[in-house]
Image (cartoon, helix red, strand yellow):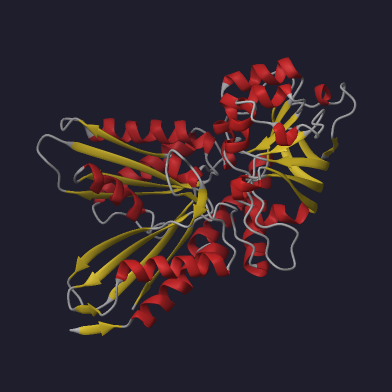
Amino acid sequence: MRQISCELFSNTLKSLLFETQYFIPEDVLENIKECYINESDSISRDVLNNILQNAKLSAATKLPLCQDTGIPQIFLELGSYVYLNFNLEKTVKNVVNIVYNEEKLRSSCVSDPLIRKNNLHCYSLHVDIVDNESLKVSVLIRGGGSENMSKTEMLLPGTTADEIKNFIVDNVINMLPYTCAPVIVGVGIGGTFEQSSLLAKKALLRNIGQRNQEKFYSMLEDMIKQNVNLKGCGALGLGGRVSVLDVFIETKPTHIATLPVSIVLQCHSVRKASKVI
Amino acid sequence: MDIAISLPIKDETLLPKLTIGDKIRVNGELFLFRDQVHKKIAENDTDQLDSINFLGSGVYYCAPTPVKEGFLIGSFGPTSSYRMDKYTEYVLKLGFKVMIGKGYRSDDIALLCKKYNAIYVITYGGCGALLNQYVKEVKLLAYQNLGTEAMQRVLVKDFPGYVAIDTFGNKLWK
């Protein structure tokens, strides 16, 4: 058994939470630059230019990339041969509070969904047990605007690949005008109701251009991206060449009677980072 | 060429000259508020607003991050406007003429823009660090207990945006 200390875990999580608020990942930034160079629509071009300027300014000034500093969604891949000699939940809560207070990140959560008194920092924590001796910590910061553009539908098992493609394309096109496009589309197909939405979320952690290993799904990813971009929604949905930077599909075995499909849109302010301890 | 707009609007003939897709630069006073204050205005819970004149004013749907040392305000990007749609007429009745946010809005808003001679403007969503630069002065006005959603008055210079719905009810989206 390998022991990972509270200090090592806390410091890792702290640096990921810090990094995500001020730095757009390199793969996303490069892709947005490419979109900017190739864009001919004047509004989209101006928007993309300002997105790039915003990334520069945030990195330099440490003003958050987006005022919605979101809910940190923390995904752990915990090796079976790793021993944590501390309370994981308490530690995560503590580190989130420290970083959000120290960095003056917005308290975007209400303690009760109906009474809605704005007074705290929230997070979500998902742990997968994997067969190794390390701990992978991934952080995805999700603002409310992006989170609202999510959908899970229980389709019938006989639904064809073409129908699923159309279902995803139609839903993405309907949600796009509300988002800070260009977006990344995360898709989860299969599993149970809650597993499919988790798959869609985890799909967002992939790097731009990284395809599903199954040829069938990688082709589906490309087709969805192409079909949506052909609609010409553009940056912020105001018209232009690119509204989707990439599409990532993840799948899981499912019940003979079900076919859950989840779609999650990630705005251009992609705040994600991972580290293996 | 960007079109400069001074807020509050004093000349009623100014806004009808703008059309969808126009890039504008806002100068002057913006009131910051969003979901919770909209709800209060719709429910007539407005004692705290009695002394404020909103005629010709602009509202910016924004809940900034807390202020960091060396800055006037935090990250200053817009929130999604569609959530304000059901309360918007109450706000326009107070005299607001310019609404700034991000994203698509319902057809009702196009009708309301026509009825109240108002416009809806989209600014750079997800660009809070960039938009911070246009802020020149900040004052907390009302509903302090709402935290980040409290109403603030902000003076801006050259704050950028695109006219997404004009006073004739035209919409920019394709």
The picture quadrant where one finds residue A128 is bottom left
Q: How many marks?
A: 0
Q: Is residue A275 visible?
A: yes
At 77% from the left edge and 31% from the top edge, which residue is drawn? Answer: B50
Q: Residue B77: x percent and y percent?
A: 64, 49
In the rendering, at what x and y percent does residue B32 appear?
A: 70, 42
Give the camera-side residue of B154 and A40: B154
Quadrant in which the C terminus of chain B appears: top right
* Of the pair B153 and A9, the residue shown nearer to us: B153
- Could you tell me which residue is drawn at 68 percent across and 61 percent down? B67
Residue B122 percent location from the top left of the image: 67, 37
The quadrant holding residue A11 is bottom left
Any part of residue A216 in sight:
no
**In front of the other: B98 or B138:** B138
Q: Residue at x 51, y 46 (%)?
A: A117
Looking at the image, residue A276 sits to the left or right of residue B100; the answer is left
Q: Is residue B174 above or below residue B158?
A: above
Quadrant including the N terminus of chain B: top right
